[in-house]
């Protein structure tokens, strides 16, 4: 548990007029306590909980049921509280009420990390306090990464790059998209904590769909371009990398589209600096494509924040005016997509510094041609 994170949260609580915060987001519990979630998901039903945190001015409590208490007890920095079955929103609310210190009048909760019915039951169980939503509070704390966090992200990205190098050695004509995705997943499970998201593998025409699900029937052919997008996890922190492969020598159009995307990405990378808005950074890619007459084929934002979650703030999109700042980590991943032909996306993950960027991605961006 990093005590500085609790200190920063308490400062944010004081500014927001909150005496306590009930933390239900698994990623935020991990951020505050170091306890990794055992089940995937952003919302835990209160009838089947893993663990929650209650942060007050002078104490931090973790509430969990019997399946997890053995893995949690003994960690320093907080008190562990057993939730006994049957568990419900009401019973958890009653436990929270019993843990509140005298004088707590305002209690924050994460509306985006509770089912609506659970939020109703939880708040009804403690009518003596004023409940306030505060889901942005921890998201805002997490957006600026510490030096240690950046090093964990660098390691996650390094393992992710090694997985791509592995794929380049084993991919062959006749494999299915699912075969390649499983090969990526197996490598990451062996060499990291697993996949930060389900790997995207697209052959030829299916590369036109940015978040494509690999098919177990689509077979790789000579001459096809392969889009791969995946990430490993290191100590909870996510990697994210998109690279392209051609089975054989790239033809003129494959090379042309690839070079257009690479040029757009390099323009954006060169233009990142503290104080620039997300909109301005997105425009560096979008305007480049417009100057080449292909902006209509760029169908998503330029990037997204990465940390304990694979998608978090900041969002590098044309509708976002937030300014980037040192310590922010996000992807730069322009792409061009053409129905019936395919798509090209190139993605790096960078950390903003005082003067520009620290590119956490060392994997070559030379188009891989496998003869």
Image (cartoon, grey):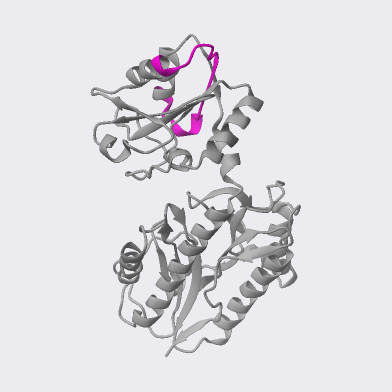
Please tell me whether residue 105 belongs to the stretch shown in magenta.
yes
Q: Is residue 19 left or right of residue 322?
A: left
Residues drawn in magenta: 98-117
Whether residue 159 is visible = yes
Locate residue 68, reporting x and y percent.
28, 37
Residue for point 58% across, 30% down: 10
Q: Image height check: is 289 above or below 254? A: above
Residue for point 33% across, 37% down: 74
Q: Give the camera-side residue of 268 and 130.
A: 130
Locate residue 318, reporting x and y percent.
69, 52
Image-quadrant location for residue 281? bottom right
Please tell me whether residue 313 belongs to the stretch shown in magenta.
no
Q: Give the camera-side residue of 226 and 58.
A: 58
Q: Give the camera-side residue of 152 and 189.
A: 152
Locate residue 70, reporting x and y percent.
26, 37
Residue for point 44% across, 88% down: 248
Q: Image height check: is 326 above or below 209? A: above
Q: Image height check: is 106 above or below 207? A: above
Q: Image height check: is 70 above or below 361? A: above
The N terminus lies in quadrant:
top left
Q: Is residue 37 left or right of residue 15?
A: left
Residue for point 46% across, 56% down: 238
Q: Is residue 81 left or right of residue 260?
A: left
Image-quadrant location for residue 347? bottom right
The C terminus lies in quadrant:
bottom left
Q: Is residue 330 left or right of residue 83?
A: right
Image-quadrant location for residue 67? top left
């Amino acid at each position: 548990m990093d005590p500085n994170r609790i200190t920063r949260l308490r400062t944010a609580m004081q500014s927001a007029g909150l005496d306590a915060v009930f933390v239900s987001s698994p990623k935020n519990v991990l951020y505050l306590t170091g306890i990794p979630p055992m089940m995937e998901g952003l919302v835990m039903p209160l009838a089947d909980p893993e663990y929650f945190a209650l942060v007050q001015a002078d104490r931090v409590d973790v509430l969990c049921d019997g399946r997890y208490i053995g893995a949690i007890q003994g960690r320093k920095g907080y008190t562990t509280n057993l939730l006994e079955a049957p568990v419900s929103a009401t019973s958890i609310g009653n436990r929270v009420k019993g843990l509140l210190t005298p004088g707590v009048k305002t209690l924050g909760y994460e509306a985006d990390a509770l089912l609506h019915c659970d939020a109703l039951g939880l708040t009804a169980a403690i009518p003596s306090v004023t409940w306030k939503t505060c889901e942005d509070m921890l998201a805002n704390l997490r957006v600026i990464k510490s030096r240690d966090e950046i090093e964990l992200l660098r390691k996650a990205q390094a393992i992710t790059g090694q997985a791509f190098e592995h794929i380049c050695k084993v991919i062959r004509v006749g494999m299915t998209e699912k075969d390649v995705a499983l090969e990526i997943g197996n490598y990451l499970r062996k060499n990291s904590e697993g996949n930060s998201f389900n790997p995207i593998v697209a052959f030829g025409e299916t590369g036109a769909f940015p978040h494509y699900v690999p098919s177990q029937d689509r077979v790789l052919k000579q001459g096809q371009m392969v889009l791969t997008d995946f990430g490993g996890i290191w100590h909870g922190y996510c990697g994210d990398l998109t690279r392209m492969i051609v089975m054989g020598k790239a033809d003129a159009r494959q090379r042309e589209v690839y070079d257009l995307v690479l040029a757009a990405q390099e323009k954006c990378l060169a233009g990142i600096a503290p104080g620039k808005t997300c909109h301005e950074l997105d425009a560096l890619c979008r305007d480049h494509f417009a100057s080449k007459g292909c902006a209509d084929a760029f169908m998503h934002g330029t990037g997204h924040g990465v940390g304990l979650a694979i998608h978090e703030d900041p969002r590098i999109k044309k509708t976002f005016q937030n300014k980037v700042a040192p310590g922010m980590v996000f992807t730069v991943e322009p792409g061009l997509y053409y129905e019936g032909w395919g798509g090209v996306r190139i993605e790096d993950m960078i950390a903003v510094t005082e003067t520009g960027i620290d590119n956490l991605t060392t994997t070559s961006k030379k188009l891989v041609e496998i003869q």
